[in-house]
Amino acid sequence: MFIHFQNLKSFLMAITVIFTLFFSQYAGAQDTAITKPVVGTTQKIGDVILFALPVATLGTTFIIGDNQGAWQFTKGFLLTEAVTYGLKVSVNKQRPDRSNDNSFPSGHTSAVFHSAGFIHRRYGLKYALPAYALAGFTAASRIDSKKHDILDVAAGTVIGLGSSLLFTTEYQQEHMELTYSNFEGSHMVGFKYKF
């Protein structure tokens, strides 16, 4: 993995700003009702997945040295958050538990489905299946906790998957290599495959 220090520093600064904005938005969008509803285990697990799945997805791109994928994920994530919060502010739909007017669309769902869609489009379905299962659980947890209805969750899914489709390309890793060498009149053809 070859990264220039200044580019890496700028990129990590951007990622820090993105996740700071993301986490502060979700902290600010929590319940504002006078009587706070009881938070169940399902909702808590969904909240953990909300943070863990995007962080794990972005972290994996760095681990495997896929800088282009990291940038694509970041662009899609920014679009997902911008569209989600733009709609929350403009629509002002009341939550089913009547705690505030931030119901449409589901921000939890849009974030986790963006991550799952990115993994699917970039690395393939076999790697995305666990992410889709976690994203589906998170979406269901939002309905179960009465924070959203099916329309909110469906809109969040479309936003998350749509933004991953816009920015993400298939990962081009070199698995096969064909070589040729000529040494003192001898010719040799080689084939190498990385599993």
Image: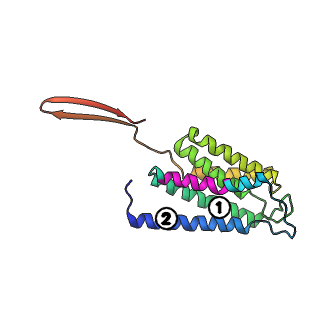
CA neighbours of label 1 inside 10 A, class few (<14), some (14 to 19), many (20+): many
Residue type at mark 1: give it: Glu
Residue in view at x 84 percent, y 62 percent: 94
CA neighbours of label 2 inside 10 A, class few (<14), some (14 to 19), many (20+): few
Q: Which residues are magenta?
A: 49-62
- Residue annotated with mark 2: 12
Q: Is residue 81 left or right of residue 119?
A: right
Which is more foreground, mark 2 or mark 1?
A: 2
Q: Is residue 115 left or right of residue 100?
A: left
Report which quarter residue 182 is drawn in: top left
Residue type at mark 2: give it: Leu
Callout 2 secondary element = helix
Q: Is residue 58 magenta?
A: yes
Callout 1 secondary element = helix
Q: Is residue 188 above or below residue 71?
A: above
Residue 89, position as x, y percentages in the image: 74, 67
Residue 148, position as x, y percentages in the image: 80, 55
Number of numbered markers: 2
Q: Looking at the image, is mark 2 or mark 1 earlier in the sequence?
A: 2
Q: How far apart are the two marked residues, 2 and 1, measured between alpha carbons? A: 19 Å
Q: Residue furthest left?
A: 184
